[in-house]
Amino acid sequence: MKIPDQGLSREAVFARLEEYRKDDTPWREGRTWAYVYDPGPEAESVIKDAFGSYLGENGLDPTAFPSALRMENEVVAMAAAHLNGDDEVVGSFTSGGTESLICAVKAARDRARELRPEIAVPEMVLPETAHAAFHKAGHYLGVKPVVTRVDPETFRADVGAMRDAITPNTVLLVGSAISYAHGVVDPIGEIGQLALEHDLLLHVDGCMGGFLLQYFARLGSPVPDYDFRVPGVTSISMDLHKYAFAAKGASVILYRDRKLRKYQMYACSNWMGYTVINPTVQSTKSAGPIAGAWAAMNFIGDAGYLEFTRKVRDATVEIVAAIDANPDLRMLGRPDMNLLSFASDTVSVFHIADEMKERRWYVQPQLAYGSSPENIHLSINPASVHWTDAMLADLHECTEKAKQLPSGELAPKIQEAFGHLAPEELTDDLFEGLLAMAGVTGTSLPGRMAEINEVLNALPVPLRERLLVEYLNVLYKA
Ligand SMILES: Cc1ncc(COP(=O)(O)O)c(C=O)c1O
């Protein structure tokens, strides 16, 4: 493939783009229960126009584009007030949860470099439910993750285990509000006390829950404290492109004070070009995402968010009750917000997910890890709640159907053939063999994912990760 000799017409460009979309998850119909945070068409059209109108402005230089600076200051101030920060709380707009977490980990690392220079390899204490982006941040920044168990019933962090994991090299503690996998809030108050006792930083990952939990609390749900009112909390991340319904590319990272934020920033004058001074990871960046986020918050407004929350809360209650009532399914923990997961002791959840896909639903399989068995995750959207009864009826039927399908045969074979291998022993031939056992041939995306999920689920974590990288490296052909 090469660039066409002559440009296509506008009509041809959009016709092609629409054609490319045909196999995507059908989120616009509201049948997608992960990945998409959909406020419905009215808000979407406002956000899209705001995003598009600032597409070309460059957020790199706030002196050249004061509009981007102004929008950022307003969005960050609204976010800080939302999380009950006082006048000292400051923050930055970032491209998403991962970037916000990279910033938080960098700030902790660089603060330790200045104040505790004796630390050679800094460590952060992560409950098993902390998002993978912390591991990625640690990998990029040379901060070692020290993973601690969570309660196997509630899936909340075990504060005793976190206490035991603190060493002279610890620079950061982490808690989630909410965790992605099970949708629960960690005991942030107790972790805050631990942070204060040991004079450590505490980051609260509110990427998923930071925004909407405030509304859940206002509607009377028993939300544990997690924001800047909790002593010991030093930074909070909160994605706007999740449940504040901004367009993707929008999150904030907030710090208790300016002194902490400075460690996240980067300046370079050590070259021949313009002065580089970046508050966050990105440099040149469209002002579209900040305009989209600004528009979402201003257009939807507090009353609009409260109404969205009421809808997703009611749907969550209904879904949890339906799962509790199905003898083949069992909830993992009790959700504090509108994300949940459930497992099965009698049926392959991977087959259930595939059967649901045949009926044009997207539900998200999650692999077993630690005390969390393989399961299905749902994130509930305002634009999906009218489907709740239909989705649940299909979930029950798909569970029955999945019971008839063969499962559990691959796992022992995979464990026997590959379980003992170190990741570096996975040669190209072995990799092909593994994929073939999972029913994957060539480079096209498999229609059903149950076998590949079963294979991944059966492998030890380092081999899983290696296989995923190999697979992705093949999938992106170009
Ligand atoms: C709790 C939590 N933290 C961090 C992230 C990472 O966010 P992103 O995918 O925007 O980088 C997610 C994503 O789902 C999340 O749920």
Image (cartoon, grey):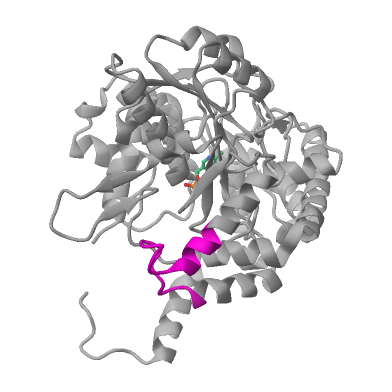
**As drawn, 23 above or below 9:** above
Quarter holding the N terminus is bottom left
**As drawn, 48 above or below 328:** below
> Is 431 placed left or right of 165 in the picture?
left
Tell me which segment is drawn in magenta. Answer: 53-72
> Is 274 placed left or right of 133 in the picture?
left
**As drawn, 227 above or below 276:** above
Residue 234 location, x and y as percent? 55, 30
Rendered image quadrant of residue 343: top right
In terms of depth relative to the viewer, which is nearer, 472 or 45?
45
Q: Residue at x 59, y 28 (%)?
A: 233
> Is 472 placed left or right of 86 in the picture?
left
Q: Residue at x 59, y 60 (%)?
A: 246
> Is 271 placed left or right of 344 in the picture?
left
Total numbered circles: 0
Dominant SS of magenta comes to loop
Residue 268 location, x and y as percent? 23, 48
Q: Residue at x 59, y 19 (%)?
A: 150
Rendered image quadrant of residue 62: bottom left
Rendered image quadrant of residue 20: bottom left
